[in-house]
Image (cartoon, rainbow, N blue to C red):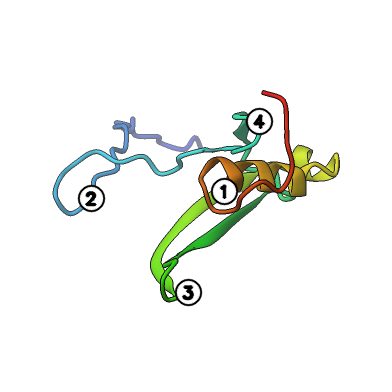
Amino acid sequence: LGTLVHPVRVTSAIMQNDEGKNVDLYMPRKCSATNAIIAAKDHASVQINVAAVDPATGRATGEYYTYALSGAVRSMGEADDSLNRLAQTDGLISKVFEYSQ
């Protein structure tokens, strides 16, 4: 005996939040050092939050700077130099080293 198969109507799923706005399920990150897209399967990548500090009191203000580093940058041993360069550009540290632009 054959199996009776009913046609199934497939509708595309639309991700919406509580307000009814369309949102995507996955938003890829970009490496802060190289500006390359970090793949979902890049398990060597890291995302680092650096707290902003009030210069008068020395306490964290609750804000932070987010840096994403890909696994390729980390495997080349360039993560520390890249993080120093990015933090210096954002004004978090001063004159760690001079770099050519």
Q: What element carries label 1?
A: strand
Badge 2 density bin: few <14, some 14–19, many ≥20, Cα 10 Å: few
Q: Mark 4 points at which residue?
A: 34
Q: Name the residue under label 2.
A: 17
The disc, 3 or 4, on the residue closer to the chain's N-terminal end is 4
Badge 4 density bin: few <14, some 14–19, many ≥20, Cα 10 Å: few
Q: Mark 1 points at which residue?
A: 67
Report the Cα–Cα distance between label 2 and label 4. Answer: 32 Å
The residue depicted at 61 percent of the width and 50 percent of the height is 94
Q: What element carries label 4?
A: loop
Mark 2 or 1: in front is 1
Residue 58's label in the rendered image is 3
Q: Nearer the viewer, residue 48 or 28?
A: 48
Q: Is mark 2 on a helix, strand or loop?
A: loop
> Three-letter amino acid code at disc 3?
Gly
Residue 21's label in the rendered image is none
In the image, is 39 to the left or to the right of 11? Answer: right
Report the Cα–Cα distance between label 3 and label 1. Answer: 22 Å
Report the Cα–Cα distance between label 3 and label 4. Answer: 31 Å
Q: Does 101 sit above or below residue 49?
A: above
